[in-house]
Image (cartoon, coloured by chain):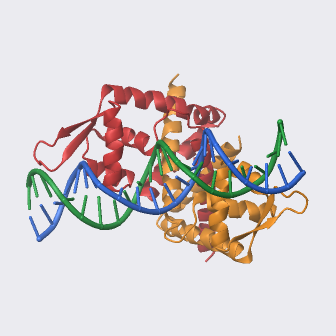
Chain colours: A red, B orange, C blue, D green
Amino acid sequence: MQELTEDAALASALRISVSRMARRLRSQQAGDALSATQMATLSTLSRHGPLTPGELAAHERVQPPSMTRVIGVLECAGLVTRTSHPTDGRQALVALTTEGSGRLVADRARRDAWLSHLLDDLEADELATLRAAATLLDRLSQA
Amino acid sequence: MQELTEDAALASALRISVSRMARRLRSQQAGDALSATQMATLSTLSRHGPLTPGELAAHERVQPPSMTRVIGVLECAGLVTRTSHPTDGRQALVALTTEGSGRLVADRARRDAWLSHLLDDLEADELATLRAAATLLDRLSQA
DNA sequence: TATTGTTATACTCTATAACTATA
DNA sequence: TATAGTTATAGAGTATAACAATA
């Protein structure tokens, strides 16, 4: 009973904290930066290697037509390539280009600068907490 | 040098995780639910009492025409009222209705419930990590 | 027939520019 | 004139429905 109450309180606190931080992070976005989904897509390709549009859509939790558009923008910008799947003609393989990889690094550095600066003031154990929390939030997001 | 690199990596990972979780939380206000700015506007009115459209626009960091639309939607839904300003005919006063106040409470409860349900599956030490992280995120957001 | 991806279309949210009413 | 708010219009992002190609 007590535990349930504490869970509910944590849920409320965590929701407010995460939402507020996300708002702050969004406000740090500069003009020519890529959108959140575009960045996340490049990031996913960087971590997983070439993926199909369907896999990317599932991973970023958008509908396939939305991912088609994202890929189109990234392809026009020369940040990804779209090649035919070796064994299944219906599918395609989206891969990061060298330019895409560079853009990812540069864009991240710019957008992370604000948060990174804040992290400088934290203690080692606090950084460890945030590192673990990031992993947990990822797991919860995929549930 | 190594520490700097790790901090930058954590900043990036944390930004992505927090943004993704915020997106998931937003997606829980399904169907008839209000948008983030609509909710934030109700919340601001709840905390500050009646405000003018200009004050609301400044507080939510949107342009005046955007706030005009938000207020229009909320007024049509019966969640706020728009009355003429007592001393300045150019201005208006937007106030929360009883129904708007109830909606605010109900929406918060629903989103808390979704996250709370997810937290049920976590271990005690993981909950402790999230509890500590929420506090840290609040501190970072205020910096 | 089922699956993968795309095209066509529409909706939401936000912005800038132009306009109205009041100070 | 200057200010508060609205209307008109446009752009970004995402969704559903319909379609094409392949398994």
- Which sits in the foreground, A30 or A46? A30
Q: Position of residue A101 (x, y in %)?
A: 36, 29
Tell whether B52 sits left or right of B38: right
x and y, in percent, of residue A110 in the image: 53, 29
Asked which quadrant contains residue B98, the reply is bottom right
Pick whichever, A110 or A67, lies toward us. Answer: A67
- Which residue lies at the image location 20% right of the left edge and 44% below the top edge? A92
Residue A1 found in image quarter: bottom right
Q: Nearer the viewer, residue A36 or A48?
A: A36
- Confirm whether residue A46 shows in the render: no
How many numbered marks does the figure carry? 0
- Measured along the vertical axis of the image, is residue A105 above or below residue A13? above
Q: Nearer the viewer, residue B67 or B87?
A: B87
Q: Quadrant of the C terminus of chain B?
A: top right
Residue A78's place in the image compared with A36, above or below, is above
Q: Is residue C8 above or below residue B82?
A: above
Q: Is residue C4 left or right of residue A44?
A: left
Q: Residue at x 49, y 48 (%)?
A: B17
Residue A77 versus residue C15 in the image, above or below: above
Asked if residue B103 shows in the view, the reply is yes
Return the x and y of residue B74 as percentages of the image width and height.
Answer: 65, 67
Q: Horizontal and vertical percent for residue A139?
A: 43, 55
